[in-house]
């Protein structure tokens, strides 16, 4: 007979998960209670205090994943209403009226159509042939595509929605499970690095559009000249570091049998899916001519995909497989960010932090470094990039100008710091649905987000600032 484990050992091992769960639940509750019951700080309204408390709870819950990220979003909206973090219910549901939430639905539908039509599988076979059974080469191809595909699919969310299905097909063909290190590396790259290729282009999505409007008038060429170096450099460095983190998975052996990679003749449904994707990409890429919001082409694609004889999906497919939790997460993060800004909590928080670094004004480099650290903290507090940019860019430019620095450089610096890392699965539009499809935990996302924060700061000081000086934008005026 085998010896049974000692009762005390068994009891200890069974209580560990329970203790961990209690800590995860009690931490946000204690933080919320502390922030709500403490005296309202000078310059902060009671409404702002409530909004800040709710945002802190939501960030902790998103990071620990004690609740599903969509449930956390809904709970955050309910708390905003109950504790007075917003003026009315309409303000709490602000995010559900914003185009970006419906843009997400459109691109998810487009990605599903490319997948269901078989087009994703065909492209995956093409990629596997090019990789010749070498996972490292496939990974390098993917990193290169993040920058190359930006010129045809500017939106990182769109590329992510399409590419995630393609690389899932590759993993399935190569018989690589979701918890394998190589699978994680690919999905982490799709969720965290893919978006860096977009920000280098003015038409690349929410970040460059909002940031360029706050920084001043930019042409397509001028934005690319100034921003391509820091963001492409961060993409390359981040890709290399991600490889090192998951390097054990790149030694996997895969089947390279040529017969295994036969795709067969192209079908009519693939042609239709490809045509819809191409038309949608052209509409996004030519927005300078027609002025349509990116959500409009995405919704046009949705309608075409669901149209009889033209499309490739039925409404029931969307009901069952779209992942509506993604919509809730994006809309709720917009609502929480809007509550922070509208209540004055965001301005109070940032102004206080910037005031704290005023003593470093004699050293421009130290002042900018402290400003970047402040920006990283604010970014972790504000999961919505548009809210972060609207809050931090004006503050950074004003603070820089007050101490004799180039305000444009200070503004561009906080764009680099804020858009390079992803701190938790709900921290980016594309990351929401990509991380949900992979066995990538919140701890892994946080770890890589912190690494990318260091990468962003290093890239800014070692590459971007000297480069910006060469092209006529020095740090000191």
Image (cartoon, grey):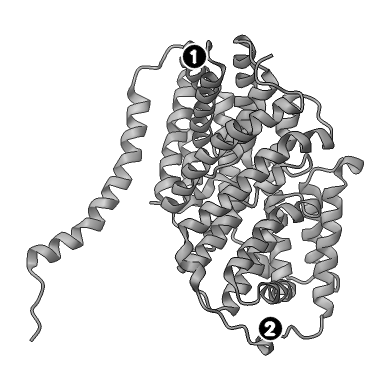
Q: Is residue 14 left or right of residue 224?
A: left
From the viewer's side, name the closer residue of 406 and 90. Answer: 406
C-alpha span from label 1 to label 2: 60 Å
Residue wearing tag 1? 360
Q: Give the residue drawn at x 28%, y 46%.
A: 23
Considering only order in the chain, which callout, 2 or 1, is on the residue closer to the N terminus?
2
Q: Is residue 390 left or right of residue 448?
A: right
Residue 391, placed above or below residue 316: above
Residue wearing tag 2? 261
Q: Is residue 254 left or right of residue 180?
A: right
- Quadrant of the image containing the C terminus: top right
How many residues crowd mark 1 within 10 Å: few (<14), some (14–19), many (20+)? some
Q: Give the residue drawn at x 65%, y 57%.
A: 143
Q: Secondary structure at mark 2?
A: helix
From the viewer's side, name the closer residue of 351 and 229. Answer: 229
Q: Give the residue drawn at x 57%, y 33%.
A: 337
């Amino acid at each position: 007979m085998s010896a049974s484990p000692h009762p005390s050992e068994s009891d200890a091992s069974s209580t560990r998960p329970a203790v961990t769960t209690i800590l995860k639940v009690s931490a946000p509750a204690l933080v919320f209670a502390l922030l709500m019951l403490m005296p309202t700080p000078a310059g902060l309204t009671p409404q702002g205090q409530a909004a800040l408390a709710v945002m802190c709870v939501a960030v902790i819950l998103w990071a620990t994943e004690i609740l599903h990220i969509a449930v956390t979003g809904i709970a955050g909206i309910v708390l905003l209403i109950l504790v007075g973090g917003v003026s009315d219910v309409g303000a709490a549901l602000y995010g559900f009226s914003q185009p970006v939430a419906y843009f997400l639905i459109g691109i998810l539908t487009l990605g599903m159509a490319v997948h269901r039509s078989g087009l994703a599988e065909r492209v995956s076979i093409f990629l596997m042939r090019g990789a010749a059974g070498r996972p490292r080469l496939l990974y390098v191809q993917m990193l290169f595509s993040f920058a190359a595909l930006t010129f045809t699919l500017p939106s990182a969310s769109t590329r992510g929605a399409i590419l995630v299905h393609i690389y899932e097909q590759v993993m399935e063909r190569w018989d690589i499970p979701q918890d394998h290190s190589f699978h994680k590396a690919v999905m982490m790259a799709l969720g965290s690095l893919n978006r860096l290729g977009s920000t280098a282009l003015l038409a690349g999505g929410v970040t460059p559009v909002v940031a360029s409007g706050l920084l001043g008038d930019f042409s397509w060429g001028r934005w690319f000249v100034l921003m391509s170096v820091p963001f492409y450099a961060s993409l390359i460095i981040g890709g290399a570091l991600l490889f090192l983190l998951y390097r054990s998975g790149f030694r996997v052996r895969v089947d390279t049998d040529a017969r295994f990679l036969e795709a067969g003749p192209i079908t009519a449904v693939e042609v239709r899916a490809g045509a819809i994707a191409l038309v949608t990409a052209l509409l996004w890429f030519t927005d300078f001519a027609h002025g349509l919001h990116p959500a409009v082409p995405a919704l046009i694609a949705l309608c075409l995909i669901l149209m009889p004889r033209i499309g490739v999906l039925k409404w029931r497919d969307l009901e069952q497989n779209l992942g509506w939790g993604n919509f809730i997460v994006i809309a709720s993060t917009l609502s929480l960010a809007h509550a922070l800004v509208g209540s004055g909590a965001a301005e109070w928080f940032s102004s206080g932090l910037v005031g704290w670094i005023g003593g470093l004004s004699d050293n421009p480099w130290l002042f900018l470094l402290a400003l970047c650290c402040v920006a990283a903290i604010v970014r972790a507090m504000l999961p919505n990039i548009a809210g972060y940019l609207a809050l931090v860019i004006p503050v950074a430019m004003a603070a820089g100008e007050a101490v004799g620095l180039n305000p444009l450089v200070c503004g561009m610096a906080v764009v680099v710091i804020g858009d390079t890392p992803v701190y938790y699965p709900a921290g980016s539009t594309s990351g929401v649905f990509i991380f949900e499809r992979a066995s990538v935990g919140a701890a892994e996302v946080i770890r890589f987000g912190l690494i990318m924060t260091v990468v962003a700061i290093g890239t800014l000081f070692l590459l971007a600032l000297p480069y910006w000086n060469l092209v006529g934008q020095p740090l000191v005026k």
